[in-house]
Image (spheres, rainbow, N blue to C red):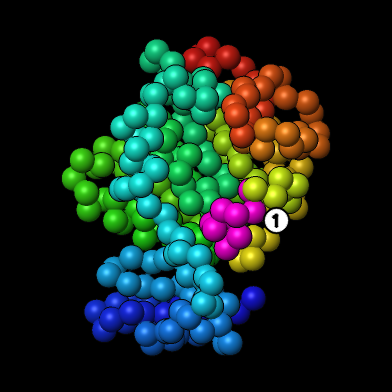
């Protein structure tokens, strides 16, 4: 895969230049996304936003971390609150709002839902490119006044989740660690999702999920929650304490101690 940073208008050039330098990637002025001879993907800065864009005539639409519109906004308003599966998996009920480490943040959608429910969520993202998308998404959301409280519950760090956990001190230990590692799907329908296609080409699979889970189980104070495709095997290692099943995905819960027990 070939990747570059591009900018759409002159007002975007400065930010694109800084981003290209930070990521050590080539900088392209006003790239033609219909052409894929040179770059297979462009990290495009346009109207102050950063999006990952595939190139070529049959390219899918851009991928970005969007916390202000679309499915994320609909879920925030009509998602069901603490009745959502992710809330049940994370033990969110009554006055219980665990402090959460999302060690595989991706596009940050689950972290945003958890922050919407009142949890403080620290996101880790190992890919510097995906981190740049998240950074941009948080900036855009911060500019929307009614999201201030939610975004205030979210923090972001570029770090490898496994390494972070292995170096974590007792004072840093979160109540709950949330994992959603990327792994090879056998369900061909999952491959049509444009962000999954882009991410897999960009960052590959999380081949260290067993080690990541082991590290999380050593650090979490109360529980580890792992999101999986509904029919996918559990991560190799200790068996989950129980699972919460949905239509297309499930949550494997590793309960270490009752939430709110001390």
Residue 168 occupies which quadrant of the picture?
top right
Above/below status of 36 relative to 126: below
Q: Nearer the viewer, residue 211 or 104?
A: 104
Q: Residue visible at 74% across and 37% down? A: 232
Q: Residue visible at 66% across and 28% down? A: 252
Residue 222 occupies which quadrant of the picture?
top right
* Residue 173 visible in the current orientation: no
Above/below status of 250 relative to 192: above
Q: Residue visible at 51% across and 28% down? A: 86
Q: Of helix, strand and loop, which one carries label 1? A: loop
To which residue does mark 1 refer? 205
The verdict on residue 196 being magenta is yes
Q: Relative to residue 143, is residue 204 drawn left or right?
A: right
Name the residue furthest left.
145
Measured as percent of width and height from the top left, residue 160 is found at: 61, 54
Measured as percent of width and height from the top left, residue 206 is found at: 70, 52
Measured as percent of width and height from the top left, residue 92 is found at: 46, 21
The verdict on residue 64 being magenta is no
Q: Relative to residue 5, is residue 250 drawn left or right?
A: right
Q: Residues within 10 Å of mark 1 (few under 14, many from 20)?
A: some
Provide the residue span drawn in magenta: 190-198
Residue 213 occupies which quadrant of the picture?
top right
Q: Relative to residue 208, is residue 4 drawn left or right?
A: left
* Residue 82 visible in the current orientation: yes
Q: Residue visible at 20% across and 40% down? A: 146
Above/below status of 197 relative to 115: below
Measured as percent of width and height from the top left, residue 124 is found at: 52, 50
Q: Which quadrant is the N terminus positioned in?
A: bottom right
Q: Main secondary structure of the magenta part?
A: helix
């Amino acid at each position: 895969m070939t990747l570059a940073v591009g900018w759409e208008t002159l007002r975007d050039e400065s930010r694109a230049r800084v981003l290209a330098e930070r990521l050590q990637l080539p900088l392209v002025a006003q790239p033609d996304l219909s052409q894929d001879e040179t770059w297979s993907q462009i990290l495009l800065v346009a109207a102050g936003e950063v999006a990952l864009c595939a190139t070529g005539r049959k390219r899918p639409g851009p991928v970005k971390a969007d916390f202000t519109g679309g499915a994320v906004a609909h879920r925030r308003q009509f998602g069901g609150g603490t009745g959502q599966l992710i809330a049940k998996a994370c033990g969110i009920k009554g006055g219980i709002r665990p402090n959460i480490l999302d060690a595989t943040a991706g596009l940050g959608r689950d972290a945003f839902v958890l922050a919407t429910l009142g949890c403080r969520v620290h996101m880790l993202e190992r890919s510097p490119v995906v981190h740049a998308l998240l950074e941009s998404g948080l900036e855009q959301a911060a500019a929307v006044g009614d999201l201030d409280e939610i975004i205030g519950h979210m923090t972001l760090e570029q770090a490898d989740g496994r390494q972070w956990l292995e170096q974590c001190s007792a004072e840093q230990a979160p109540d709950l660690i949330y994992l959603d590692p990327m792994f090879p799907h056998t369900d061909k329908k999952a491959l049509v999702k444009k962000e999954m296609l882009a991410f897999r080409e960009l960052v590959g699979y999380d081949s260290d999920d067993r080690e990541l889970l082991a590290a999380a189980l050593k650090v979490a104070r109360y529980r580890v929650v792992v999101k999986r495709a509904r029919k996918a095997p559990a991560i190799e290692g200790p068996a989950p304490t129980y699972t919460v099943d949905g239509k297309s995905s499930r949550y494997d819960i590793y309960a270490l101690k009752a939430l709110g027990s001390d």
